[in-house]
Amino acid sequence: MARNIENYTAQVPSDWFLWAAGASIVGSLTLHALNRKEDAQFVGQWVAPFMLLGVYNKIVKVSGSDRVHGS
């Protein structure tokens, strides 16, 4: 199952995750400025998962998830 997900996500450029994290920061700042602090905190917490997904995506593109069984 992981291999199928990786084949699909390998088609997504790694930059998209960086842009998604940046958009989350901007969205959070905007919500904070609009005095919607709980919503701002919720959206701001998306930054780390987007960055982690980007790192995972990059690692999978370079070495794959399961080097024992090959591709």
Image: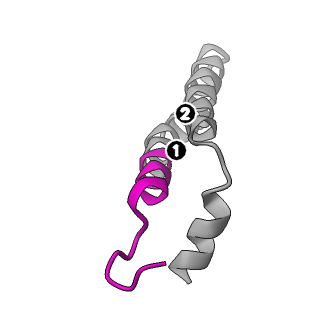
In the displayed structure, 71 sits above or below 54; it is: below
Q: Secondary structure at mark 2?
A: helix
Identify the magenta region. Answer: 54-71
- Packing grade of label 1 (10 A; few <14, some 14-19, many >=20) is some
Tell me where residue 16 sits by quadrant. top right
Residue nearest the viewer, comparing 31 with 66: 66
Q: Nearer the viewer, mark 1 or mark 2?
A: 2
Tell me where residue 32 sits by quadrant. top right
**Does the residue at mark 1 contact the one at mark 2 (Cβ under 8 Å)?**
yes
Residue 57 appearing in the image: yes
In the image, taking residue 47 as reference, residue 65 lies left or right, namely left
Residue 22 position within the rendered picture, expressed as x and y whole percent measured from the top left? 57, 26
Q: Which residue is mark 2?
A: 18
Q: Secondary structure at mark 1?
A: helix
In the displayed structure, 35 sits above or below 67; it is: above
In the displayed structure, 4 sits above or below 39; it is: below
Residue 11 position within the rendered picture, expressed as x and y whole percent measured from the top left? 68, 54
Point out the tag, 1 or 2, that comes first from the N-terminus.
2
Residue 50 position within the rendered picture, expressed as x and y whole percent measured from the top left? 52, 44
- Identify the residue shown where x is 57% and y is 19%: 29
- Identify the residue shown where x is 54% and y is 77%: 3
| Circle 2: residue type | Leu
Q: Which residue is mark 1?
A: 50
| Circle 1: residue type | Phe
Tell me where residue 18 sits by quadrant. top right
